[in-house]
Amino acid sequence: MTKVTAQLSVSLDGFYAGPRHTGDGDWVDSAESAGFFRITRWATDAMAWRERQGFAGGERDTDSEIIAESFAAAGAYVMGRRMADGGEEPWGDEPPFRAPVFVVTHRPRQPLARLGGTTFTYVTDGVASAVEQARAVAGGKNVAVAGGGSLVRQVLKAGLLDELELHIVPVLLGTGLSLFDADLDLDDKEAIELTPTRVVPTPQVTHIRYAVRGRAALVLDDRGSGGGPTAIRQ
Amino acid sequence: MTKVTAQLSVSLDGFYAGPRHTGDGDWVDSAESAGFFRITRWATDAMAWRERQGFAGGERDTDSEIIAESFAAAGAYVMGRRMADGGEEPWGDEPPFRAPVFVVTHRPRQPLARLGGTTFTYVTDGVASAVEQARAVAGGKNVAVAGGGSLVRQVLKAGLLDELELHIVPVLLGTGLSLFDADLDLDDKEAIELTPTRVVPTPQVTHIRYAVRGRAALVLDDRGSGGGPTAIRQ
């Protein structure tokens, strides 16, 4: 059965890139890219990622298997406009997706067919529509939300995400583009609950897969004391 | 050899409690406590924590073993003032630490001796001094930074932390008190690197222990393409 999944590499403090590059100069020289390159290094060192990019070499290790598995599980992709724009040139004639990609954007644009089975379709009527269009062509495989972080949050907020896999990279950036922020629209005493379903540790990164259970109220427990609440405040 | 360690429970989005309680009303009824109680529930359900609090029952499981191990490894504690103040009443006559505790504070105060081996010493000349005083009496065991998050950040920022264990709870709070924030004083293209040394997954929480390696420059890699950088931007 088709699941809607997302997987993203994040620093231990929750950033998927450095602070947003806005000024002059090349993106590749920015603090945003410096953070991004550090966070994604485990993937670019892996053979399965390099093969899809047409690069030689790489490590044939557990990290590489995780990537190969993600590619194999995806029947279609949903992607944010900024990621699609940023990738258009470096991905070249044969992007690594080899499946239909639905780009959520405000700008209408003709579909773009690339070599190797990757097509880009530009969806202007919102994230739910993009997910539905991707589901229709996923052939029973998963709809993978490819990123960026803002799109992952939108899908999560809309209650459309079934599974989230985080690749937690052992580095603190201190600042940057945050996967999670306050725009999840949670009430004062409300949370989104998940269940960890798989944890794969490697020297470079900890891969944790979660099933998304959904919104739930935060209920005061009594710390089991039989009396009033007693807590160690941190 | 004595290591300086910290361990803290955090939500998947990096919060160790809900948003700070500032207004009127009891802390236990606040959004801060609602988040805190959710994040620490795995611990309060565990037998090893309950025993130290004088509570009956609890689960004798891997989570409980992790807590027992933390208590056993600590020869002395360093603690923030807010946590010490907040705990003073609920911890009662016999606090769970059973070791010397050094409280970092601006307010001079006479030492406080409690039953079971817990003593509170109030240190007014900074976090480095508190760590040194704790090290001197730790008897070769670890100096454990008990929290809260602000103190953990100070110790990390000062380069004094050897080991960090995060108990990552599968919930998104959206907002709250953040373990990590920008006050780590990192430069634009600088990060703190860590190495994961142990990962213990349980149904309630993922325990990841890191060795802190220290500050390092974020270096632009070439994505291994042999040419200019090509990246999937997220």
Image (cartoon, coloured by chain):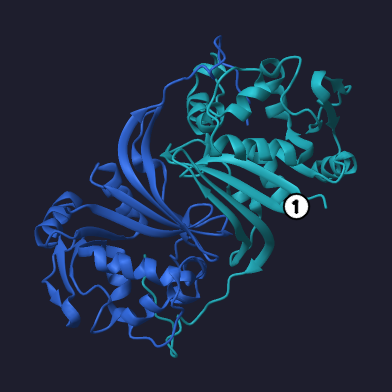
Chain colours: A cyan, B blue
Chain that bears disc 1: A
Residue occupying the far top of the picture = B227
In the rendered image, the vertical position of residue B177 relative to residue A230, given as above or below: above
Q: Position of residue B218 (x, y in %)?
A: 41, 26
Query: Going 43% across and 77% down the picture, which residue do you hit?
Result: B60
Q: Is any atom of residue B171 visible in this view?
A: yes
In the rendered image, the vertical position of residue A92 relative to residue A144, given as above or below: above
Q: How would you rate the neighbour count of disc 1 (Cα within 10 Å): few for under 14, some for 14-19, many for 20 or more?
A: few
Q: Position of residue B56 (x, y in %)?
A: 40, 88
Corner quadrant of residue A148: top right
Residue that mark 1 sits on = A158
Corner quadrant of residue A219: bottom right
Q: Horizontal placement of A234 versus A91: left or right? A: left
Query: Going 62% across and 28% down the picture, which residue do you hit?
Result: A49
In the rendered image, the vertical position of residue B215 relative to residue A109, given as above or below: below
Q: Position of residue B222 (x, y in %)?
A: 51, 16
Q: Position of residue B29 (x, y in %)?
A: 50, 76
Q: How many marks?
A: 1
Front-lying residue, B138 or A50: A50
Query: Going 26% across and 68% down the picture, which residue do you hit?
Result: B72
Query: Going 74% across and 42% down the picture, which residue do you hit?
Result: A73
Q: Horizontal placement of B233 versus B27: left or right? A: right
Query: Mark 1 falls on what kind of element?
Result: loop
In the rendered image, the vertical position of residue A21 relative to residue B94, given as above or below: above
Q: Amino acid at mark 1?
A: Ala
Q: Horizontal placement of B92 versus B1: left or right? A: right
Front-lying residue, A69 or B172: A69
Quarter that holds the C terminus of chain B: top right
Q: Is any atom of residue B233 visible in this view?
A: no
Residue occupying the far bottom of the picture = A226
